[in-house]
Image (cartoon, helix red, strand yellow):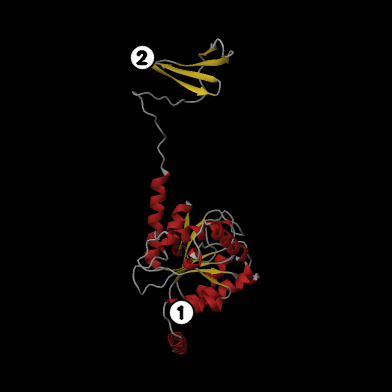
């Protein structure tokens, strides 16, 4: 009868797993140590012929370990493609990261709404967000008030009033994608800010937020740091420090510098900390060399088109 066996050590127990054509045997060896003088080793044998309630994995030079086929990589790949298709249709632009928990009466909501409106008008680009509630809703509203395109990468379950909802209450369905996988969503958020041409105007804007915001924020910051974001041209990264929200985080990064885990001035070179909307707008105007005359000309054109 053909078969094979192998031994596995679990502390003081050694399990011999044997397999024949018809059954599996587990034979336990319990080791008993005697004194060092006689140096003997005794074993207690117990033979288990009962069928195991699980399907064991056997390995030998004749049999390879078999894993269940994982379908998720193909599904993630397909979802990433859908994210890219949405970006190709709406255009790259400014990606906002921020809390989904702040309601419309919060001062940060009002500031974020106004910021998104002003930046959309300044850069004339698409506004991208997590397409959820809170500050994500604020930037969506602001960009829509500016009359500029809005897109989003939603996640099925998130904090806030739209928990476990796959649908946006007012954005057209063709303007956002509800992602099953965080990895695909992040690919979309990153690709939306890539600048392959010098005339592309994009940015990452980190608004106040929690764990999800910090996760996305530092992942994108690391991609910029390691020059793996896939952009031919620099992408501005703005940290909105409303009411000193991120001041303690910035203090911690200073501690990291003191310990040597972060190089001196390294983080400061990767982003711009802004305490107000005006500071952010001035920075972006300087970064993209947009003069005040260009801005006033846009406003004048908009005014004439309104009268017409």
Q: Is residue 166 above or below residue 61?
A: below
Q: Is residue 302 above or below residue 132?
A: below
Residue 77, numbered label: none
Q: Is mark 1 on a helix, strand or loop?
A: helix
Residue 145 visible in the snapshot = no
Q: Is residue 190 above or below residue 113?
A: above
The picture places residue 170, in percent across and down from the top left corner, at 53, 66
**Circle 2 residues within 10 Å: few <14, some 14–19, many ≥20:** few
* Marks 2 & 1, CB-CB < 8 Å contact: no
Quadrant assignment for the N terminus = top left
**Circle 1 residues within 10 Å: few <14, some 14–19, many ≥20:** some
Q: Which of marks 2 and 1 is nearer the N terminus?
A: 2
The answer to whether residue 290 is left or right of residue 210 is left
Q: Which of marks 2 and 1 is in front?
A: 1
Q: What element carries label 2?
A: loop
Residue 2, numbered label: 2
In the rendered image, which quarter is residue 162 located in?
bottom right
**Which residue is painted at 38% across and 60% down in the image?**
84
Front one among 70 and 270: 270
The answer to whether residue 163 is left or right of residue 227 is right
- List the residue tagged with mark 1: 285
Front one among 213 and 14: 14
- As measured in the structure, the alpha-carbon distance from the residue carrying label 2 to the one carrying label 1 is 77 Å
**Which residue is painted at 34% across and 24% down in the image?**
61
The picture places residue 52, in percent across and down from the top left corner, at 51, 21
The picture places residue 290, in percent across and down from the top left corner, at 43, 81
């Amino acid at each position: 009868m053909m078969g094979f066996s192998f031994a596995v050590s679990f502390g003081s127990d050694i399990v011999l797993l044997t397999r024949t054509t018809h059954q599996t045997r587990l034979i336990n060896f319990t080791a008993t140590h005697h004194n060092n003088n006689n140096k003997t080793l005794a074993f207690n044998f117990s033979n288990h012929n009962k069928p195991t309630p699980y399907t064991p994995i056997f390995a030998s030079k004749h049999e390879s370990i078999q894993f269940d086929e994982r379908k998720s990589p193909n599904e993630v790949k397909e979802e990433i493609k859908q994210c890219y298709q949405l970006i190709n249709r709406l255009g790259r632009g400014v990606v906002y990261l921020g809390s989904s928990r702040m309601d419309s009466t919060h001062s940060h909501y009002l500031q974020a709404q106004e910021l998104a409106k002003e930046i959309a008008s300044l850069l004339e680009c698409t506004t991208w967000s997590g397409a959820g509630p809170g500050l994500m809703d604020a930037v969506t509203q602001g960009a829509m008030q500016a009359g500029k395109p809005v897109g989003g990468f939603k996640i099925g379950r998130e904090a806030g009033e739209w928990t476990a909802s796959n649908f946006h209450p007012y954005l057209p369905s063709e303007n956002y994608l509800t992602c099953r996988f965080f990895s695909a969503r992040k690919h979309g958020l990153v690709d939306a800010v890539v600048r392959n041409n010098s005339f592309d105007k994009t940015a990452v804007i980190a608004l106040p937020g929690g764990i999800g915001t910090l996760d996305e924020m530092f992942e994108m910051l690391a991609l910029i740091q390691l020059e793996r974001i896939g952009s031919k041209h620099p992408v501005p990264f703005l940290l909105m420090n409303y009411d000193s929200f991120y001041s303690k985080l910035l203090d911690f990064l200073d501690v990291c510098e003191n310990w040597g885990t972060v190089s001196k001035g390294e983080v400061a070179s990767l982003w711009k900390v802004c305490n107000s909307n005006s500071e952010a707008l001035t920075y972006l105007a300087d970064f993209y060399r947009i003069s005040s005359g260009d801005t006033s000309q846009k406003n004048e054109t908009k005014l004439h088109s309104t009268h017409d």
